[in-house]
Image: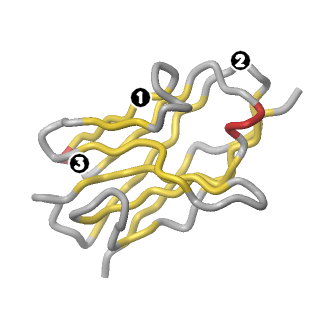
Amino acid sequence: QVQLVESGGGLVQPGGALVLSCSASGINLNNIVMAWHRQAPGKQRELVASITRTGTRTYAGSVEGRFTISRVNNIAMTYLHMNNLAPEDTAVYYCAAGPSPTHPTYWGQGTQVTVSS
């Protein structure tokens, strides 16, 4: 049974930072792209960042230069370092896995990130 479990969300002030973690189990990570998506209230879910097994990264334009995605394959962990957070980053963040970052096969349950003063 594949499980993706996110942690690290919370409330942070504008300009602050958070690190999200995703633990994967029950899945062979070879040829799997790990990704973070987010969904803000009233908006469609969007791809935030992705990373291949060999470390090729992509970012949404709105987070480029502020967010960094990374993964440690031997412990099946994926991270999203988020800096200089803004209120528009408020959303539920989802870890996702699959051969394509835009159409993942597996999803985590999501973790809430709220940026507010």
Per the image, the residue denoted by label 3 is 75
Task: State the residue at coordinates (63%, 19%).
Answer: 84
Which type of secondary structure does the marked residue at label 2 adopt? loop
Gap in Å between the C-alphas at discs 2 and 1? 16 Å
Looking at the image, residue 104 sits to the left or right of residue 5; the answer is: left
Q: Is residue 41 left or right of residue 48?
A: right
Q: Amino acid at mark 1?
A: Thr
Within the image, what quadrant is residue 83 found in? top right
Between 49 and 7, the residue placed more toward the observer is: 49
**What residue type is disc 2 on?**
Gly
Which circle, 3 or 2, is nearer the viewer?
2
- Residue sitting nearer the eye, 34 or 22: 34
Density class for disc 1 (Cα within 10 Å; few <14, some 14-19, many ≥20) is: many
Outermost residue, right side: 117
Hey, what amino acid is under mark 3?
Answer: Ile
Mark 1 lies on residue = 68
Where residue 44 appears, x then y in whole percent? 63, 61
Tag 3 near tag 2, CB within 8 Å: no
Residue drawn at 72 percent across, 27 percent down: 86
Of the two numbered discs 3 and 1 on the same chain, state the one appearing first in sequence. Answer: 1
> Could you say whether the residue bearing mark 3 is in a helix, strand or loop?
helix
Which quadrant of the structure image shows residue 62? top right
